[in-house]
């Protein structure tokens, strides 16, 4: 069965082109031309990934993303006509996994779609506690990462992480005590065309701390090295 992708964009000419190119890649595609319809389809059709425009009638992309995140961890890629970093950071703040700035190339968009679907395909969370682990897991103090299932646990309780949060935690945890600058994390974890958008790292670190730390204000896992960047420790 092919992956199902929901395209939410009020510019029908753009959504038609996106849908055409996605269908050529073998994906099933649903389209919505306003935020309310997009939210309805996101919750009823349960797509495998959502491409979500920001500026739309009835309900903007930020609000749609916020409401989806209340019920689902489906990968969300924001589509924005603005290059303003504030727009990008706002999307990441409320739980989007990624963003692309219009106009974008088809190859770039398809590459990002495939990358997010590949990461989410192994994510089969069905319980709030560990039932069993795959053979490919590692423990970092109170944190357990199951690499085959793309799941992270703290004291046996599954953590509800987005793809990007999982990727960042995995990268840091597998390189304990190594300090990485924001620019290095952008290159290693985000990739693509993220050069200069270092606030995306800070936003994702903050969201991760809210989920894995007992006291996000006094983190014991993800530590800030003032003036340099971040590192992970399980000691």
Image: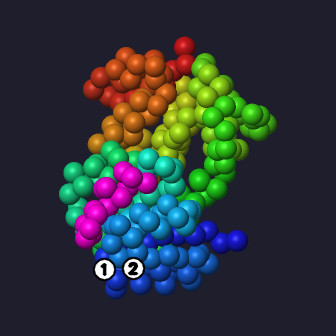
Sort mark 1 into few (<14), some (14-19) or many (20+) by Cα contacts within 10 Å.
Answer: some
Residue at the spot of label 1: 11
Q: Position of residue 146 (x, y in %)?
A: 67, 37
Q: Is residue 177 visible?
A: no
- Assess disc 2: are there few (<14), some (14-19) or many (≥20) residues with their C-alpha within 10 Å of its C-alpha: many
Residue 58 image-quadrant placement: bottom left
Q: Is residue 96 above or below residue 144?
A: below
Secondary structure beneath disc 1? Answer: loop
Check if mark 2's residue and mark 1's residue have beta carbons within 8 Å: yes
- Residue 56 lies in the magenta stretch: yes
Relative side of 165 to 135, left or right: left
- Identified at 49% across, 61% down, the residue is 43
Percent across and percent down for residue 21 are 49, 81
Q: Quadrant of the C terminus?
A: top right
Magenta-colored span? 54-68
State the image quarter where residue 226 is shown. top left
Q: Where does residue 11 sit, x and y in percent of width and height?
A: 30, 79
Secondary-structure class at tag 2: helix
Q: Is residue 120 above or below residue 137?
A: below
* Residue, disc 2: 15
Magenta stretch: includes residue 2: no
């Amino acid at each position: 069965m092919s992956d199902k992708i929901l395209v939410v964009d009020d510019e029908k000419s753009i959504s038609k082109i996106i849908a055409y190119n996605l269908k050529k890649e073998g994906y099933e595609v649903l389209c919505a031309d306003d935020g309310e319809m997009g939210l309805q389809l996101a919750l009823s059709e349960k797509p495998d990934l959502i491409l979500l425009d920001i500026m739309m009638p009835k309900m903007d992309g930020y609000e749609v993303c916020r409401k989806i995140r209340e019920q689902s961890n489906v990968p969300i890629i924001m589509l924005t006509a603005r290059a303003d970093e504030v727009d990008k950071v706002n999307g990441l703040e409320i739980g989007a996994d990624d963003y692309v700035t219009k106009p974008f190339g088809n190859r770039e968009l398809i590459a990002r779609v495939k990358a997010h679907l590949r990461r989410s395909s192994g994510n089969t969370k069905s319980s709030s506690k560990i039932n069993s682990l795959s053979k490919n897991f590692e423990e970092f103090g109170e944190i357990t990462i199951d690499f085959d299932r793309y799941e992270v646990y703290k004291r046996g309780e599954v953590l509800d992480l987005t793809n990007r949060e999982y990727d960042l935690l995995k990268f840091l945890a597998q390189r304990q005590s190594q300090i990485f600058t924001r620019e290095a994390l952008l290159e290693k974890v985000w990739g693509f065309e993220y050069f200069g958008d270092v606030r995306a790292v800070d936003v994702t670190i903050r969201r991760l701390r809210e989920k894995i730390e007992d006291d996000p204000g006094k983190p014991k896992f993800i530590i800030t090295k003032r003036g340099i960047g971040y590192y992970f420790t399980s000691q």
